[in-house]
Amino acid sequence: MSGVEVAGVGIHPFGRFPEKTLTDIGAEAVRAAVAESGAGTSGLEAAFCGTAYGGVASGHKVLGRLSMTGMPIIDVEAGCASGAAAMMLAAASIRSGQYQTVLAFGIEKMPKGIIRSSFFDPWQEAAGLTSTPAYFALRAQRLMLSSGVTEDDLAAVVVKNRRHGTANPDAMFRSEVTAEDVLASRMVCPPLRLWMLCSPNEGAAAVVLRRSGRGRTGVRLRSSVVLSHLPGPVLSESTPLSGLCDDTVASPTSRAAEAAYDQAGIGPDDLDLVECQDTDAARELLSCEELGLCDPGGSAALIRDGSTALGGRLPVNASGGLLSKGEPLGASGLGQVVELVRQLRGDAGGRQVAGARVGLAHTIGRGANASVVVLSR
Amino acid sequence: MTTVQEDLFTTGEDPHLIGGRCRDCRRLHFPRTGTCPYCGADTVETTELPADGRLWAWTSVTAAPPGYLGPVPYGFGVVELGGCVRVVTRLTEPDAGALHAGQPVHLVLDDVGDGSDGPLISWAFAPDGP
């Protein structure tokens, strides 16, 4: 995707902010991104806002607060991939020649605990089929069977990401944990314990994209892809985790990754860092396999030999991941993009990946939809 | 008898889940939908799925998800029926440690109500034998 660059980024920390409204949270992130871009409040031509639980015209409310109405303001919903979906549309609108400068942002204010989703029918709730962590647990168990991943490996993912998160002031959890702590935390759905699961929370992230000319100064957007799974019964059509009911149906992550590598003209070997979906510890390892960061079945080795830790061959979730940041659904994908941009500029402080030139961000949303974004400096 | 939804399973002494088989691509799915989830053909015929199968993946749910009124903890997993179709299901065994991969299971009907308004019947799979 030549021709699109990141002009500015902004983030509202991920956490819990009972004193703030969704509009407050979104406005902080957007204001920061617009200020950094130098576009001014009248310099944007369109805005796409990713949110899953925000409600009617929530993006409009944020931009109204900032006196930035007058352009098209379109909310985009794709579950946990909502922010990345907003980015895909923003980038496409520039690439098509329609606009020069466009805003993509993601906002969310999630309640604590298990998320009720209108995705499920009432009978599925009554029949006990709607526990999201239980679906994560089934995928984790299958990964343990197929890839030799152990409980200790799952704990090691949490320890790694929480260590990374200590250097991220925008993360909700900023303290280190030990493997013993993780393995002593409450069992939620075997094999997944409480600390192996990310927390739904609140936050916002914003990115100003612009057509890049000769004087390009920003980070380059190399690809921005969202793809859904191919037709087939995805776990009775009830979860973001395709492959349980029929593993002949390609995972949306594999499909999105393939398209994104193709669009960017790179392969997994060209990456310097990855921010991937780690809604649970096993999901990070499975994401690594589906993104082609290792051979199928090779994810346990990645965590055991330190490849994916800061200082390793290919740091994964240097931001601390969702396990440290928590997950505000609509903001999740763009929070990853903000992290990559800071890393590629060399502005990531104590979690900086030395010499980072190419980064990849990945989410999976209900449906299932997967997003993959590739950026380079 | 009140069930969680009509047309998910037959009732009586020998219950079965009601699936769909596509007349075009011949693939099975559950629950039955009017359109084949694989190929989009609208020529789906109703078929009773085998009541016996094997355990493919399992866990236990320790906190009731919103809208579920039945007992907690409960077992949850994926079973493979007749080696041809996988079904997401509750399991009668809540202790994940008591189950193993490939374990034979069979269909049962049970109550997932809160007792306030008579039984609310759904399905689950139970491990065979002790």
Image (spheres, helix red, strand yellow):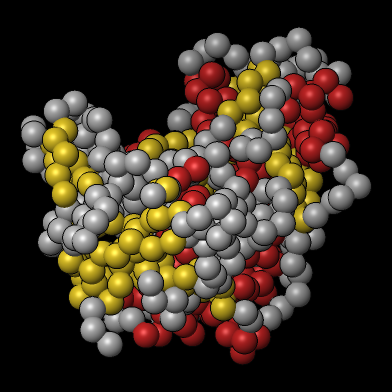
Q: Is residue B57 left or right of residue A165?
A: left
Residue A46, above or below A78: above
Q: Residue at x 58, y 28 (%)?
A: A76
Residue A347, image x, y percentages? 73, 54
Q: Is residue A251 left or right of residue A41?
A: left
- For the residue pair A314 and A114, the one nearer the viewer reads as A114
- For the residue pair A282 and A372, the one nearer the viewer reads as A282
- Count of numbered circles on the image: 0
Determine if residue A40 is in view: no
Residue A100, image x, y percentages? 62, 17
Q: Residue at x 59, y 56 (%)?
A: B116
Q: Is residue A135 left or right of residue A53?
A: left
- Quadrant of the rendered structure where residue A185 is? bottom right
Residue A47, above or below A26: above
Determine if residue A116 is in view: yes
Please state, as top left, top right, bottom left or bottom right, where the N terminus of chain A lies in the image.
top left
- Quadrant of the rendered structure where residue A30 is? top right
Residue A263, image x, y percentages? 38, 36
Residue A165, image x, y percentages? 70, 67
Q: Residue at x 60, y 48 (%)?
A: A116
Q: Residue at x 61, y 73 (%)?
A: A194
- For the residue pair A147 and A44, the one nearer the viewer reads as A147
- For the residue pair A188 and A72, the one nearer the viewer reads as A188
Please state, as top left, top right, bottom left or bottom right, where the C terminus of chain A lies in the image.
top right
